[in-house]
Amino acid sequence: MSKSEIVKTILMTAATALIMSGVFYPPTAAAADRSRHPGDEQLAKITTFLGVMEKYIKITEEFYGIASDGERAAAFAIMEIKTVYDQSGNRQAAIKELTRQLAQTNNRTIRNIIRFQLLDLYKQSSDTPAAMENLRSIIKENLK
């Protein structure tokens, strides 16, 4: 059973238990029978909680997918390097760090991601020659 199937099973089991206990009932039933169920406020809280938990589980699964794949984790980290330096307003430090990372890897996918991040930084800095050199390098490395 996959992780997503396990998560769905847990959510369905929890919802079924709540329905059977009379605390939770389907939204369509809630809309039709509001006058018959004095626990509507409690139902709304539980429904909201279940929705938040479902979103949290989805985010956790997505992050796990990134963290468990070395190449995807490296790609995410590279994009975050640029973001961290961008937020501090220090593009030159970002360029220096990304250039250092570029020199340390032979992984073509990671090199492409680094170069695209550098390209964006060069464009933001209006450094057309560096941006063009970067584009030429991307083309050359990928058309071998």
Image (tube, grey):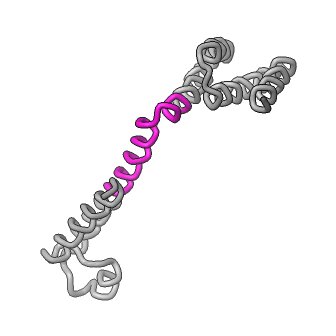
Q: Position of residue 19 (x, y in %)?
A: 20, 76
Q: Residue furthest front?
A: 144
Q: Is residue 128 above or below residue 44?
A: above
Between 31 and 112, the one lying in front of the other is 112
Q: Position of residue 98 (x, y in %)?
A: 63, 18
Q: Is residue 34 above or below residue 122?
A: below
Residue 67 on the magenta span: yes
Q: Position of residue 47 (x, y in %)?
A: 29, 66
State the image quarter where residue 131 is shown.
Answer: top right
> Which residue lies at the image location 62% right of the left edge and 20% below the top edge?
106
> Which residue lies at the image location 42% right of the left edge and 41% below the top edge?
63
Residue 16 on the magenta span: no
**The C terminus, quarter of image:** top right
Q: Is residue 124 visible?
A: yes
Between 68 and 56, the one lying in front of the other is 68
Q: Is residue 51 above or below residue 108?
A: below
**Majority secondary structure in the magenta region:** helix
**The N terminus, quarter of image:** bottom left
Q: Is residue 80 left or right of residue 42?
A: right
> Which residue lies at the image location 70% right of the left edge and 23% below the top edge?
118
> Which residue lies at the image location 65% right of the left edge and 25% below the top edge?
111
Q: Which residues are magenta?
A: 53-75
